[in-house]
Amino acid sequence: MSETAKNETLGTSYVPISMPGTSRADRNVPAASSAHCTAHAVLGAGSGHHVQAESWLELSALYVLNAMQNVASIQEQVRFFYGYDPKKLSQHVFDVVATLTDGTKIGFTVKPEVRLVSGRFLTEMQEVAWWAVEKAFVDEVRLVTERDIDKVDLRNAQTLAAVREADPEADALALSLISGLPEGVGQTLRRLTIDMGMQARGYRALIRLIREGMLCPIKRGLIGPELTVAQTEKPFRQMVDTDDSPTVTPEMIAA
């Protein structure tokens, strides 16, 4: 019996398996490190693409950025050359460059707070930020530390990343189901999954609707069966940019 016939017999749809795209990084991270972890993941939509990180903090930032509604694409390990003398250019590798849906490009450098104590890295980043904006490499530069990674956001981002691959049959049924929900009335993911009658496939399809911003939690919390959601046109997630998040700008040099 063919694979397609088996799926039809089991009442499931056949979705071809596609390999993820290659990493977009300008440089590969080391295969291993004695001082910190190195990590690899598959992010993006559909079959996704391979991403690399040199620490758990970098990987966490990649996950959270990947889940943001206003982030169109991300590229890790991006080289940037700067300086006045073309023959003696300095180099900085941005941990992530994110392009937003409005076209804005943001360069992220990710460092644990302990690495900022001496002030040397911040001084270096002030110069890098000035050149990066001056040369229109990015529109702004931001610094991310462990304080900027919320545990709930990270856990939800990992959940959203896990359901990136479409299931056309389940996705269509999930969309049809929530279109009939009264405005402002919430239902738990468990209740909606039962109503769909597709078990795990239905549950994953509903989480994909959260990923796409078509379902929104009534209250902040971890994505799970008991999470109450409602139909909405508003994005599920906003940019993580709290008052505590330091932004490195060209103006800091003058200061």
Image (cartoon, grey):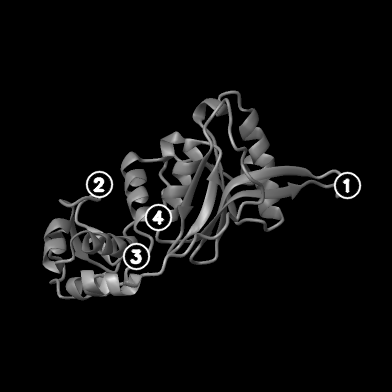
Residue 195 placement: quadrant: bottom left
- Kindly identify which residue carries mark 2: 222
Question: Would residue 90 appear left or right of 66 to someone viewing this image?
Answer: right
Going 24% across and 49% down the picture, which residue do you hit? 220
Residue 99: in sight, yes or no?
yes
User: How far apart are the alpha carbons under marks 2 and 4?
Assistant: 14 Å
Q: Looking at this rendering, what residue extends furthest in the front direction?
A: 1
Q: Position of residue 114 (x, y in %)?
A: 52, 25
Question: Would residue 196 appear left or right of 103 to someone viewing this image?
Answer: left
Going 25% across and 60% down the picture, which residue do you hit? 216
Going 36% across and 44% down the picture, which residue do you hit? 154
- Kindly identify which residue carries mark 4: 67
Q: Position of residue 101 (x, y in %)?
A: 48, 66
Q: Looking at this rendering, what residue extends furthest in the top direction?
A: 118
Mark 3, secondary structure of its residue: loop
Residue 109 placement: quadrant: top right
User: Which one is earlier in the sequence, the residue at label 3 or at label 1?
Assistant: 1
Q: Amino acid at mark 3?
A: Glu
User: How far apart are the alpha carbons under marks 1 and 2?
Assistant: 51 Å
Q: Amino acid at mark 2?
A: Leu
Q: Position of residue 66 (x, y in %)?
A: 44, 54
Mark 2, secondary structure of its residue: loop
- Kindly identify which residue carries mark 3: 212
Q: Position of residue 89 (x, y in %)?
A: 81, 45
User: Which one is earlier in the sequence, the residue at label 1 or at label 2?
Assistant: 1
